[in-house]
Amino acid sequence: MSLNPYLIDRMLNSKGQEIHFLEHPTRGDEEQVICSCPALGKADYSSFYDLDDMLADHGEYEPWFDEQGRFQIGDLGNPNE
């Protein structure tokens, strides 16, 4: 992440992964929120433009990275496939 995107917020998901929510470094809030897991060195677009659903207590849209490092949203799978 050489352009140093802005850190909006962070969370610890139910899998114990620290997820960082980042604003796109050049398009700002006109682009999808980027989710990264620094411990895994992985990042991907979330398909969301705000954090409300991803941070909701019900966890339906909780972001996480699977064993192969692929980004997932809750039980819905990868939003970018």
Image (tube, grey):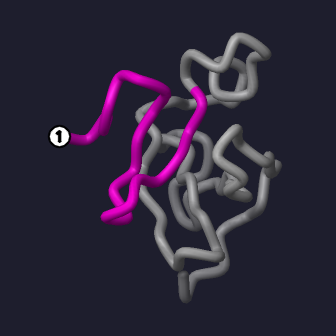
Residue that carries the numbered disc 1 in the rendered image:
81
From the image, which quarter does the N terminus lie in? bottom right
Instruction: Tell me what residue is drawn at x 70 percent, y 38 percent.
Output: 14
Residue pictured at 17% horizontal, 40% vertical: 81
Of helix, strand and loop, which one carries label 1? loop
- State the image coordinates of residue 48 (x, y, percent, origin top left): 51, 30
Horizontally, residue 25 falls left or right of residue 66, namely: right
Q: State how many labels appear.
A: 1
57 to 71, vertically: above or below = above
Q: Which image quadrant for residue 37? A: bottom right
- In the shown orientation, is residue 2 left or right of residue 47? right
> Could you say which is closer to the camera, residue 51 or residue 24?
51
Q: Residue furthest left?
A: 81
Please state which of residues 26 and 16 is positioned toward the viewer in this rendering. Answer: 16
Which SS type dominates the magenta stretch?
Answer: loop
Amino acid bearing label 1: Glu
Q: What stretch is highlighted in magenta?
A: 62-81
User: Which residue sits at x=42%, y=57%?
Assistant: 44
Residue at 80 percent across and 46 percent down: it is: 11
Front residue of this view, candidates 62 and 79 = 62
Residue placed furthest toward the top: 58
Q: Is residue 74 above or below residue 12?
A: above
Q: Position of residue 2 (x, y in %)?
A: 55, 88
Magenta span has 71? yes
Classify mark 1: residues with Cα within 10 Å, few (<14), some (14-19) or many (20+). few
Residue 34: x and y in percent read 54, 52
Please check the rendered image and state whether residue 57 is part of the magenta-colored stretch, yes or no: no
Residue 69, above or below 71? below
Q: Percent from the top left, x then y, of residue 39?
A: 64, 76
- Give the side of residue 76 with respect to residue 55, left or right: left
